[in-house]
Image (cartoon, helix red, strand yellow):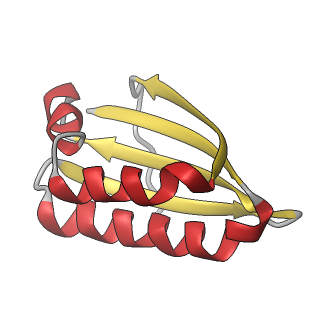
């Protein structure tokens, strides 16, 4: 598996539109990409323009494929002007823990 986290800070006046775009991107990725296993979007409760994404892909190749999709290109074009900062970090899972809930 291959995981990434993305910290995104948007312009305050675009917080709602950015959140909508992130949720749409997550839905598209899960629906249209067999290699996308998880796409979580979280918002900072004290700053509605700050987001944290956690994405899990089958492997690094699936993530590379993700970046080549039309919906990813549309998302980047739409949200680029809304952003102040974006930081992406790659992760390699050591162990997966799941709850029984």
Question: Is the residue 14 above or below the residue 40 in the image?
Answer: below
The location of residue 37, given as percent across then percent down, is 25, 53
Q: Is residue 74 left or right of residue 85?
A: left
Q: Is residue 23 left or right of residue 75?
A: right
The location of residue 92, given as percent across then percent down, is 39, 23
Question: Is the residue 6 above or below the residue 69 in the image?
Answer: above
Q: Is residue 82 left or right of residue 56?
A: right
Is any part of residue 101 visible from this angle? no
**Residue sitting at the far front:** 81
The location of residue 44, given as percent across then percent down, is 77, 60
Q: Residue at x 50, y 49 (%)?
A: 80
The location of residue 90, given as percent across then percent down, is 44, 25
Is any part of residue 5 visible from this angle? yes
Q: Is residue 100 left or right of residue 27?
A: right
Q: In the depicted view, which residue is nearer to us: 101 or 81?
A: 81
Q: In the depicted view, which residue is nearer to us: 78 or 60?
A: 78
Q: In the depicted view, which residue is nearer to us: 31 or 71?
A: 71
Q: Residue at x 23, y 36 (%)?
A: 63
Q: Residue at x 58, y 74 (%)?
A: 17
Quarter of the image containing the N terminus? Answer: top left
| Residue 47 picture quarter | bottom right
| Residue 15 picture quarter | bottom right
Q: How many marks?
A: 0
Q: Residue at x 26, y 42 (%)?
A: 57
């Amino acid at each position: 598996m291959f995981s990434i986290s993305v910290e995104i800070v948007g312009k305050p006046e675009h917080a709602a539109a950015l959140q909508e775009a992130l949720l749409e991107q997550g839905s598209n990725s899960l629906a249209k990409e067999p290699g996308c296993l998880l796409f979580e979007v979280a918002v900072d409760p004290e700053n509605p323009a700050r987001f944290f994404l956690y994405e899990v892909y089958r492997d690094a190749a699936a993530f590379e494929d993700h970046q080549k999709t039309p919906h990813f290109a549309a998302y980047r074009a739409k949200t680029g002007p809304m952003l102040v900062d974006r930081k992406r970090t790659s992760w390699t899972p050591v162990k997966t823990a799941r709850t029984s809930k």
